[in-house]
Amino acid sequence: MHSMKNSGNTGKVRVFSGAQPSGDMHLGNYLGAFKNWARLQADHECIFCVVDLHAITLFQDPKILASQTREAAAAYIAAGVDPDRCILFNQSRVSGHAELAWIFNCVARVGWLGRMTQFKDKAGKNREKASVGLYIYPTLMAADILLYKASRVPVGADQKQHLELTRDIAQKFNNDFGVDFFPLVDPVITGEATRVMSLRDGNKKMSKSDPSEMSRINLTDDVDVIARKIQKARTDSGEIPDNVEGLKDRPEAANLIAIYAALSDQTRAQVCEDFGGRGFSNFKAALTELAVTVLGPITSEMKRLKDDPAYMDSILDAGAIKARELSEPVLREVRQIVGFLGV
Ligand code: TYM
C-alpha cells in the first residue's frame, strides 16, 4: 500500500514553500511568507526553495538570474531561515520538480488552469503571447510541494487558489490511480499582513513587478530609502480610527495599520487602539521607526550574504543534495504507480 505519510523519519510535519527569484524581495514577501517560515522551523521539518524554474515563465536575463537566485536565498536567511535547521536550495537543481510537473500536467484539466486568477493577471490582455509555462505554472507548484509529500505550505493570501489546485491535483491523482499516496496540503496563511498592498495604491498588491519603486519596500532598501517610502506612502485625509471597523473602505490606512501590526507582532485592533485619533504624520513617524528597527538588521544581513557568493553557493549545494535525497524515493513510487517501465 502506498502511504500518504511524509517519507522523512523525523516525525515532524513537513513544510514546503518558495519564492521566485524574479526581482528584489519586498516587505510583502517578508510579512506574507518569510517571517512565517522562520517561525515554523521550530517544530516542523522545513524545505524552502528558490523557484528559478517558476521565474523563467517570464523572461529572465540569464546574466542576472544566478545572482538573483543567490539574493533570494540570502533574503530567506536574513529573514530568519536557518540553513542548519532546514533544507534551502534552488529548484532547477532537483530535476524531479520538472518530471513530476509533467505527470501533473496530464492529471490537471485545462479548465482548472484557465480559472487561475494569477495567470489572468500576469498574462493580461495578450494571453496568446503568454508563455505556455506561465499557463501551467500551478502544476509545477503542485509538484514542488508533493515531490516531498509536504503537507503544510506557508504563503501569502495570493497563493491560496494555487494551493486549492494542488489539493485537486493530489486528489485526482489518488483517484485516477486508486492510491492513497499524496497528502492534501494545508495552506498556512497567517499573520496580520497576509496581503500587503502597494504603498501607492491600497487596492493593488505590493509586487516585484510594479514599475514604481515607491510602491514597495525592498529588502535591499537602506534605512533612508525605507523612511522616504513610508513618508511618501499614500493615505487619506482622515485620522487613524480607534477600531478596525473604522478601516473599512480605507485601503491605504488599512494597509499601513496591517504593516505596523505585523511588524510589531500585535493585532490590528491593538494598533488602532494605540493610535486612534492621531493623524497620519504622527503614525508614519512611528511606523518608520518600527520598520527601520525590524528591517534594518535584515537588509544589512542580506548585504553581507550577497557579498559572499561562495558561501551562498555552498548552502544551496548542500540543500540540493538533501532535497534530491528526499525526493527520489517519492518519485520512484510515482513512476511505479503510473506504470513506467524500468523503475
Ligand atoms: P512569489 O515569488 O510571488 O512570492 C513569494 C511569497 O511571498 C508572498 N507574497 C506576499 N504576501 C503578502 N503580501 C504581498 N504583497 C505578497 N507578495 C508575495 C507570496 O504569497 C509567496 O508566499 N508561486 C509562488 C512560488 C512558489 C511556491 C511553490 C510557494 C512556487 N512553488 C510551492 C509555495 C509552495 C510565487 O510566485 O510566490
Image: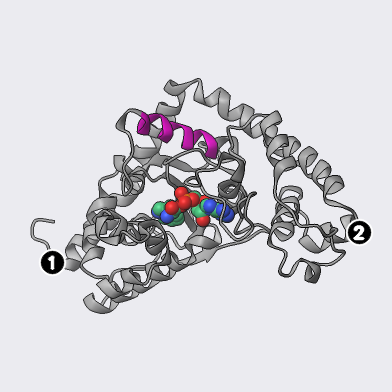
Pick whichever, 112 or 167, lies toward us: 112
The structure residue drawn at horizontal position 42% and vertical position 66%, both measured from the top left corner, is: 117
The verdict on residue 72 being magenta is yes
The verdict on residue 305 being magenta is no
| Quarter where residue 139 is shown | bottom left
Residue matched to label 2: 277
Relative image position of residue 207 (x, y in whole percent) = 52, 49
Q: Is residue 30 depicted above or below 340 in this figure? A: above
| Label of residue 339 in the image | 1
| Label of residue 48 in the image | none
The structure residue drawn at horizontal position 56% and vertical position 39%, both measured from the top left corner, is: 213
Q: Is residue 313 left or right of residue 85?
A: left
Q: Which comes before the other along the chain, label 2 or label 1?
A: 2
> Which residue is at the far left?
341
Going by the numbered disc 1, the residue's amino acid type is Gly
| Quarter where residue 277 is shown | bottom right
The structure residue drawn at horizontal position 58% and vertical position 38%, both measured from the top left corner, is: 218
